[in-house]
Image (cartoon, grey):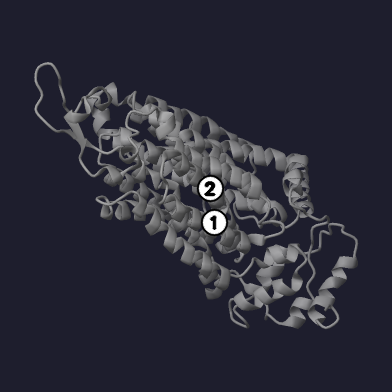
Amino acid sequence: MADSTPLLSELNLADSEPPVLHKHLPSLDSTIERCIGDFGWAQFLQATLVSFSWFFDAQQTFITVFTDAEPTWHCTQLTDRHSSCNSASNICQLPQNLWAWDRPKYTSTVSEWALECSSSLVTGLPASAFFMGCLIGGLALATLADTSLGRKNMLFLSCLMMSLSTFLTAFSTNIWIYSALRLITGFGRATIGTSALVLSTELVGRRWRGQVGVIGFFCFTLGFLSLPAIAYSQRAHSWRSLYIWTSIPTLLYSITVHFLVRESPRWLFVRGRKEDAIATLKCIAPIDSANTKTPFTSSFISSLSFEQETGNVDLYSAISVLVERRWAFQRLSAVMAIGFGTGMVYYGMPLALGSLNFNLYLSVTFNALSELPASIIAFFFIDQMNRKTSLLVFTSLCGICSIMSVLKGMNPIWTKLQIGFELVSFFSACSAFNVLLIFMIELFPTCVRNSALSMVRQAVVLGGVFSPMLAAAGRANGGFLSYGVFGVVVGVSGLFAFCLPETRGRGICDTMDEQEYKETAACNAVGRA
């Protein structure tokens, strides 16, 4: 095969050279940019299609806000002096014949399965099971996108698994089967955001990498916004209809990904699949256009050489490399700590909205809308935003506003401003989450980028595992155990940003050796200064 393909024959000559890091040897990042330019329509369409997976990701992440909500109820008859029934009564202490749900029992899992008097651990089990599934799936599938499957196949299989398990969830017969299926849904969903973000950003040059990454955030916001609209239109129908209406489009999308999305040329090159990588470059490159810095021809590519990974990366060696190399472990530990606090607030606040004296559909809509300015700010200003400073500002603001919302009982004005503080806190959490994900793309090289990002997302999900329990506990004490804990945790976790290097405006690396060379060169430059 190599002999019949001159392009591959000439590229393979680099394999016989010693795997030594040469200062003059260009990176794969700069090599690909010379071929495809910074940005083109083919890249935009591919990145947008890939990023749309976040739309369905958001739906499954927050769907239990509506399906597992405790419905409103009313008294069914006038009561005498020996019994009382009013809006402040505890329905668990009232006879069954004195009250009834405002809507049919099948509109919520709580009313259909009579969970209104169950403990918060039981009512919060489906949401916690979903995040536990995300955690298990992220750990089990973390490196597959970097190794055997690749970014595209991982995205396709994740969307397919999520859509099928979501459809089956609609036929649950009790809380235990329901929770088990939610766990499977979370397992399948675990790598969607990671694979989509990495794949979309690896298709473009460094100038547009931040903006392309933000496309996924916009899609996530749209998916979040679609939930209250769908839930409101189905409010008189069974909660099962929400799962059916969200599973079918996801299934169709996964089929579209399989046939229309191209694999990352960076990953193909790193894995040694040069023929496939070149075919992908030819499909997405603006051939002989002004967008390319050099005409894209076979003879041009055959003359290129670049630094490649010196070792083979198997299924779990990517994580091993991240732990064994000191600089990588320090970075990974810091961003995982930040991710834990950010995730607890990001996933917890929408789940805790039931404790606010505000319409559930409107409050969820306002929270979803608050993601829009966060995404817009990231899209237009990500190139001007220092990663470390932005994380510190947003996590601090998030923590302060979250704690302020707990102080509503100390002064009457706080009660009126409660939803305002909550929205500012959630907006700050969204902004911190967006910056953190872009930061992650720049902190680690291509060979382990997907694995590192997966690990950080698992830290985010781990924070989400505790969110349903805190949200349920907060309903009994005015939000102190939800918003109060959220604020303290995210504020403390944001301080770990001091342990990370600034990456704004820097090119990304493709191998661990190349990354270490740049770190050493930077340290030497600082020492000489």
What's the residue at 64%, 67% (across, down)? 263
- Provide the secondary structure element on which disc 1 rests: helix
Q: Quadrant of the N terminus?
A: bottom right
Of residues 158 and 408, the one nearer the viewer is 158
Q: Is residue 227 left or right of residue 4?
A: left
Q: In this view, does 190 lie to the left or right of 19?
A: left
Circle 2 residues within 10 Å: few <14, some 14–19, many ≥20: many
- Above or below, comparing residue 166 to residue 128 in the picture: below
Circle 1 residues within 10 Å: few <14, some 14–19, many ≥20: some
Q: Where is residue 96 in the image (x, y as percent from the top left)?
A: 22, 29
Tell whether label 2 touches label 1 (CB within 8 Å). Answer: yes
Q: In which quarter of the image is the C terminus?
A: top right
Q: Is residue 321 visible?
A: yes
Q: Identity of the amino acid at label 1?
A: Met
Residue where numbered disc 1 is placed:
161
Q: Identity of the amino acid at label 2?
A: Ile
Q: Position of residue 376 (x, y in %)?
A: 42, 55
Splitting the image into 4 quarters, where does residue 472 fall? top left
Q: Where is residue 340 in the image (x, y as percent from the top left)?
A: 55, 37
Q: Position of residue 217 (x, y in %)?
A: 47, 55
What's the residue at 48%, 36% (across, down)? 344
Q: Residue 41 carries which label?
A: none
Q: Is residue 470 visible?
A: no
Of residues 184 and 198, the one nearer the viewer is 184
Label 1 or label 2, whichever comes before in sequence order = 1
Residue at mark 1 to residue at mark 2: CA–CA distance: 8 Å
Residue where numbered disc 2 is placed:
184
